[in-house]
Amino acid sequence: QAVTAYSLSNIKNEFLDIGCDYIIIGDLEKPALELYKNLHKVNEIKNINGVISKEFSNDKINFIEDLDLLDFPAWEDFPLKNYWDLGYAHGPLSNKKYLPMLTSRGCPYPCNFCVVPKTNERRWRSRTPKNVLDEIKFWQNKLEISEFHFEDLNPTVNDRRTKEFCNLIIRENIVVEWKIVAGTKVESIKDNETIELLSKAGCKYISISPESGSKEIMKNIEKPFNYDHALKSVKKMNKENIFTQACFIIGYPGEKKSDLIQTRKMIFDMTKRGIDEIAVFIITPIPGSKIYNKFDGFHSLSNLTFTPTWRKDYKKLYKERLIMYFIFLCTKFIFHPLKMLKKSINFFRKKFDTKME
């Protein structure tokens, strides 16, 4: 359940050819258990949705509709202390202990650079607010966890659900710090009322993904984005002490210099309004994404990283990436100097408000 994932069904032969017996795709809980129970019954295995082998391919994705029926993850069986001792995580880490959470699966948007439309078929399924809060309380009691990092692809799709979750935390007076670290669609955070509730309920960090300042590129990506709403939301989040990140991609097929200049302007505008950090990624083709076949030059799947040095335009894009970070830092120094000072202090204290720290 991540934009950094890839489609196993698209590259199944890569695994089958090196001796993999079975590949499981989709929601893993049910088919993995069925496969385990029927390992010696080939005819039974053929009928399990989401199971692929050299002999057959049942690549129909198995979706779990009611996520509340799933047990909470058995985090107590993991070497959690080793992770906590690192002192950092995917999201900015403010406490000594934290846990990641998935409150929903999938995303309804069709973005062409992303694998999620393939792996989740543009379906979004969510746990109920009560179920999510029950898990938070469970880990607070069992492991004394007070910080949670939401790793959903898009946790705020349903604004009513977001408000209900926040109101539950407020009503039960739960002391918790939670962060939307893997990103969400800023338009799904509908209004100032939602932002105020998020802040009051303990949300301290939200990552959003404008992707590009160019309307032409966004049209090619097939991702709608409300520029004005994003600027107003970032300004309001800044006022409500919610730290924010904006993620951008460069190097999309057909991107021109003028498109990059528009992205630079968007970075300036968002930083001026209070965005706390940016992340600029050079696009790489993901197996299962619609743009996967529009690239060549890589020799193996292992080349498909956030540093695609195999791209002929890599040096040019890397230089552009540095320019965008320079614009962000200069703008931040000018319009929000105290926040920049705090970043430096946080770095040495190892109590982080942003991923950048």
Image (cartoon, grey):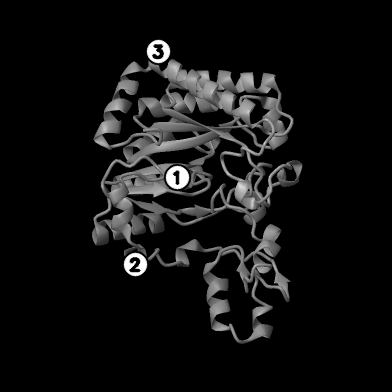
Describe the element under mark 2 as helix, strand or loop: helix
Describe the element under mark 3 as helix, strand or loop: helix
Q: Is residue 9 above or below residue 219?
A: below
Residue 78 image point, x, y percent? 35, 63
Q: How far apart in space, not on screen, are marks 2 and 1 (Cα)?
A: 30 Å
Q: How far apart in space, not on screen, are marks 2 and 3 (Cα)?
A: 48 Å
Query: Of the numbered discs in the image, which one, if any, rests on residue 77?
Result: 2
Dot in front, 2 or 1 = 2
Sequence-wise, the earlier of marks 2 and 3 is 2
Residue placed most toward the observer, 287 or 180: 287
Q: Residues within 10 Å of mark 2 (few under 14, many from 20)?
A: few
The quarter of the picture where residue 283 lies is top right
Q: Is residue 140 above or below residue 90?
A: below
Task: Give the residue at x 41% y 53%.
Answer: 101
Residue 351 in the figure: left or right of residue 216: left
Query: Of the numbered discs in the image, which one, if any, rests on residue 162?
Result: 1
Is any atom of residue 122 visible in this view?
no
Residue 259 image point, x, y percent? 67, 22
Query: Of the numbered discs in the image, which one, if any, rests on residue 252?
Result: none
Residue 107 in the figure: left or right of residue 252: left
